[in-house]
Amino acid sequence: MTVWKSIFLASIILVVMIGLVTFISYQAQVPSILQQEQIDVQQNLFRSTKMVDDGLNDLYTQGPEWAFWDDTYEFAQNPNSEFVTSWLYSAAFKDMNVNIIYISRLSGETLFSKAYDLTQMEEIDLPGDFGEQFISGSPLVRKIISRNGISGILALKDGPLSISAFPILPDTGDGDPAGILVLGRFTNLDLDSNQIAAGGARLGIVNSNMALNANPLLSQIQEMNATRKDQLVAATNNETISGFQILEDIYGKPTILIKLDQPRIMFSNWTRMVVTLDFIVAFVIVAFWLLMDIFFRRLNYAQSQQALAEKQFRLSEEKYQTVSEAVPDILWEVNASGIYTYLNSRVRDILGFEPRELIGRNSMELGDHSNHLGQGNVRNLLIQGKPVYGLLNTFRHKNGTEVILESNSLPAFDQNGNLACIRGIDRDVTEREATSALIKQVEARYRQLVEQINAVTYIRLFEDENRYFFTFMSPQVEKLLGYKSDDLVQKNNSWVPLIHPDDRARVQSESLHSLVSNENFSGEYRMVTLDGRTIWVHEEAALSNELGQRPGAWHGVIYDITIRKGMEEDLRYISSHDAMTGAYNRGYFNHSLETLQNSSQFPVSIIVCDLDNLKTINDRLGHAAGDKLICNTVALLQKCFRPEDIIARTGGDEFVILFPTTDEKTIESVLARLDVAIEKYNSSHWDAPIQISVGAATGNEGSILDAIFNLADSRMYEQKQIHKKSPSSS
């Protein structure tokens, strides 16, 4: 084939391949690009829906703080300007992040209503159809009263409004509602395009019946609304992919539509990607073409060399056929230049190579599979002509495994005394050497295990259940206990005096049990070192009766677990104590309450405390001062009460104290002592005094302690309300 024909053929192949790549790329990648874009839009719609839900949850958590408040309840019964001036001022809207606060009686009479623009910080008009939702007896009002509070979205003419609404009740939550409280925020304030999607995405929220005549997806949107499907994602054109999410309003109707327009960045980059891919394909085809040309040229040369080698092989095969095929080892011959001139067929069984694959090749250039002569040995034979016996060399079988050969070789000389060739025999000693190496490896590992492992190993021989002595003790015992192995070996009962006195009887009992039951021993106990320190160890021992002696011998190991024991103790403390104050935590309090419920330590008294002025200290002096106040309060409680009394921090500024075997009369004196201690503390800490509300209750035998706790908590809450209304409490 001429050069021009080759170029023409390569050009045709190149054009066809580029066309195929372009077509296949379009068919394979564009659908996946569209699918990924749809997934991105779906994820962004999910994030936007979650933002709306988070906004509703925020409103819902604020509602009870106002609706279930005695001051609000009193205002609903007797409206007064003082409540409005004190609590419903303009800055309150910003603090609460709401646009609308609405209070009305159940009759529908509006007591307070105000709308506020949080961006312009100015009062605005209420939406025109807002009040229609809360007329007397409306479905929404009935739902609020029956459910004790709701949240959701109102679809108003001016746009969707997120609200939470609650019946107005006193602090106790009992009685009939005096009215309803509504907190509202414009839903679009909860949506931030920058937090949802980047790259120029546009996000909006409208009523689902909004006219979208200019949108090519109008029919699909209408079908989505009619079939009650809540989401639609489709490509509007080659530049934009749109997503629509329908939300239900507070009545459970599909009313609100979230619309997201996102640029198709991945699709717009597809052309550049295909051009780059075509360039790569063209480069690969040209490179492949050049490599094939080089390959065939080399192949022709290799074929000529192969023909020459086969000729030499036939000549050598006839020469040594009879003798070489009868021996189980490899017979070989190399000339003075180190080129193989003969190999018998055993090379196939031992090395995996056919003789013709090696004949004609230089023994010094064949790599791992034929370096069994060794370059040093070959050089020695070629230069000096000396024989070599028992030379071990490692090389690779054709399948990649390693084989060890033992070589013996002799030189041959011509009539002039010059080296003519080297003839030798190789014997496979792989299994022999592997067995020898394994024995050495096992011995080395056992020695390393015994002498270098970070543990004490031993052999302990028992004469009977009460008498024993060590026949071996590894030198690591000196690092562990300070005693040398010679101090313990061959001495009767030398281990027991080193065990901590508090653990000695237990360890001896467990050891005796293992001997009698013929079971392995496993235990953890303390020991006393030579310098008087106490450490923890873990011992494992296996009982052996190989020699038939009774009760037998222990082969064991001993580890230092002092650090682990310390960590376990630290973890037990952390799991039951408050990190900041050191008092018990709520989990430990609940466990203690359950334990006392099933104990005989009645009567049990409970004191519930709550700081009244923590928020004031935090606002005036900072949270560090508030944390210090909490810690000082715990310290004061610990000084006032007995060590066996359980002091727990159950909340930020809430504390509970359990008093086992303490009756009502005693708890009264305890409360008086606490008042004196607080007054004494406050006399020297006037800038950050302890102001606390306290409730106490006592349960006799047969009482349910959960109910006693609730009673103490209720009494504390009653005192807190008194402090709240008292001018001195501020």
Image: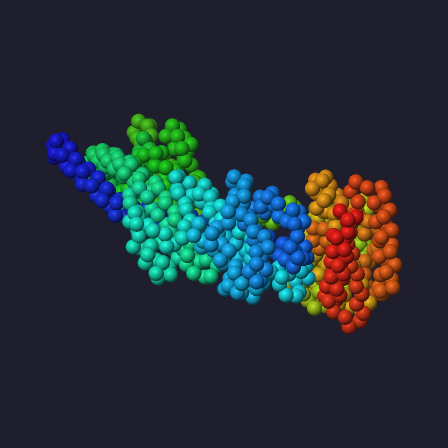
Q: Nearer the viewer, residue 494 or 691?
A: 691
Q: Nearer the viewer, residue 668 or 211?
A: 211
Q: Horizontal and vertical percent for residue 675?
A: 85, 52
- Quarter of the N terminus within the rendering: top left
337 relative position to 688: left or right: left
The residue located at (68%, 59%) in the rendering is 171
The residue located at (34%, 37%) in the rendering is 366
Q: Nearer the viewer, residue 416 or 358?
A: 358
Q: Horizontal and vertical percent for residue 84?
A: 64, 49
- Report the colour scheme: rainbow
As displayed, is residue 523 above or below residue 319? below
Q: Is residue 84 visible?
A: yes
The residue located at (32%, 31%) in the rendering is 336
Total numbered labels: 0
The residue located at (57%, 56%) in the rendering is 110
Q: Nearer the viewer, residue 218 or 157?
A: 157
Q: Is residue 547 visible?
A: no
Q: Quadrant of residue 663?
A: bottom right
5 relative position to 203: left or right: left
Q: Horizontal and vertical percent for residue 153?
A: 48, 55
Q: Quadrant of residue 665?
A: bottom right
Q: Horizontal and vertical percent for residue 61?
A: 59, 54
